[in-house]
Amino acid sequence: MPDEFKNITIKSFDINIYEQEESRLRAAQAKRIAGNFVKKFDLMKEQGKGLYLYSSIKGSGKTRLAAGILNALLKTQDSNEQPLSIYYSPTADLIGEIKKTFSEESNIKSSDIIDSVKKVDVLILDDIGVEKVTDWVEETFTRILDFRLQHQKITIFTSNLSIDELDDKYPQGRISSRIEKMTYPVHMPEEKIRSKLAKQENENLLGLLLE
């Protein structure tokens, strides 16, 4: 998880930063779903159901909310329980890491990375759909999702595409059907807040620098 998201919580996901009423309503619903997902995580594990956070607008809060869910899961684990194994990666970065193993200088096998991603308890795939898709990429993701679907592993996705729109990105049509089965779709606000958050952070920093 990137450093900027390590301290994000579901509670700190501010719905009032959105200007449009429809955006605030969607953000409130997404926040409620995220909170209940964590509270009922044991049930979600039994059903193998993750979340698919999507909106067509970049910087709308999808990754922030996914980070809040991940951090909450880490904090709510009972000390007597076996720790959750978690893997977070933007999809384009994951593909890049796998391709690095094709080099003769690499000491890691591509199968090692793929097996880790397949078997991890909770997988967060950020920005699925932005990567350049080839037959190999689609086949790789299909292998990963097939295993996770069959073994009811929790996967959380963020995307700028709806599940149906993934069919245009992955022409073989095998990705969307698996994601539809293994997640509950959450439509995030269609409003960009990344720049607003940056301005807010700068204003807070300015206050410290002018003390």
Image (spheres, rainbow, N blue to C red):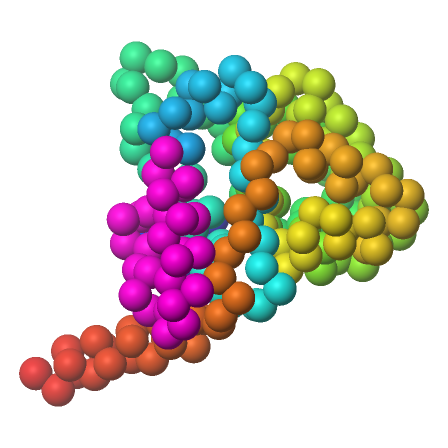
Measuring 54% from the left and 52% from the top, which residue is drawn there?
187
Measuring 28% from the left and 54% from the top, which residue is drawn there?
12
Instruction: Name the residue furthest bottom.
Output: 210
Measuring 15% from the left and 81% from the top, which residue is drawn there?
207
Q: Quadrant of residue 200?
A: bottom left
Percent across and percent down for residue 184 are 57, 37
**Is 19 a magenta residue?**
yes
Residue 105, visible in the rendered structure: no
Percent across and percent down for residue 30 are 43, 48
Q: Quadrant of residue 32?
A: top left
Report whether 167 appears left or right of 67: right
The prevailing secondary structure element of the residues shown in magenta is helix
Q: Compared with residue 83, is residue 162 higher up or lower down, i.e. above or below?
A: below
Q: Which residues are magenta?
A: 9-36
Q: Compared with residue 181, is residue 158 higher up or lower down, i.e. above or below?
A: below
Report whether 126 appears left or right of 113: left
In depth, the one of 4 and 61 nearer the eye is: 61
Percent across and percent down for residue 211 are 8, 83
Report whether 189 appears left or right of 92: left
Percent across and percent down for residue 123 are 57, 35
Instruction: Name the residue furthest top.
Output: 80
Q: Quadrant of residue 142?
A: top right
Measuring 68% from the left and 30% from the top, which residue is drawn there?
181
Residue 170, visible in the rendered structure: yes
Instruction: Give the mark count.
Output: 0
Instruction: Name the residue furthest left.
Output: 211
**Is 27 a magenta residue?**
yes
